[in-house]
Amino acid sequence: MSEFTLIVAPTYLAEITRVAAVKISARKFYACNEKLETLFKCSRKAADGEEITKHFIQLVALIAERAMLENLPKKNFRQKV
């Protein structure tokens, strides 16, 4: 059984961000909809203690940014001319 912390958004922020809650486990952040289905997720880092105490919308932005970066291809984007 996994343990996690659940941060529920105020209704107005859930409408703006389309994220109703954030689940925080030992190794990952999960942005969830109102049915607690995962919309996107990212890994946690050791220095994320301060990130958890930020405003909900900043936490959602952090998770979205990291999730996008984790899903980028690992290729070198330099093109030879």
Image: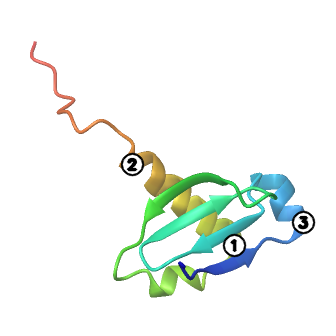
Task: Report the Cα–Cα distance between label 3 and label 2.
Answer: 28 Å
Residue named by callout 1:
56
- Number of other residues with Cα within 10 Å of mark 3, as a class: few under 14, some 14 to 19, many 20 or more: few
The amino acid on which the numbered mark 2 sits, given as a three-letter code, is Leu
Tell me how far mark 2 sits from mark 1, CA to CA.
Answer: 20 Å
Q: Residues within 10 Å of mark 2 (few under 14, many from 20)?
A: few
43 horizontally vs 79: left or right: right
**Residue visible at 78% across and 62% down?**
20
Q: Residue at x 54, y 79 (%)?
A: 1
Q: Secondary structure at mark 2?
A: helix
x%, y% of residue 78? 16, 27
Q: Position of residue 61 (x, y in %)?
A: 59, 60
Cα distance in 3D space between marks 3 and 1: 12 Å
Q: Quadrant of residue 35?
A: bottom right
Relative to 73, say whether 34 is above or below: below
Q: Earlier in the sequence, mark 3 or mark 2?
A: 3
Residue 11 circle label? 3
Considering every residue shown, the one lying at the far left of the view is 80
User: Please, what secondary structure does the residue beneath circle 1 have?
Assistant: helix
- Residue 38 — which label? none
Q: Is residue 42 above or below residue 5?
A: above
Q: Residue at x 37, y 50 (%)?
A: 70
Secondary structure state at the residue bearing disc 3: helix
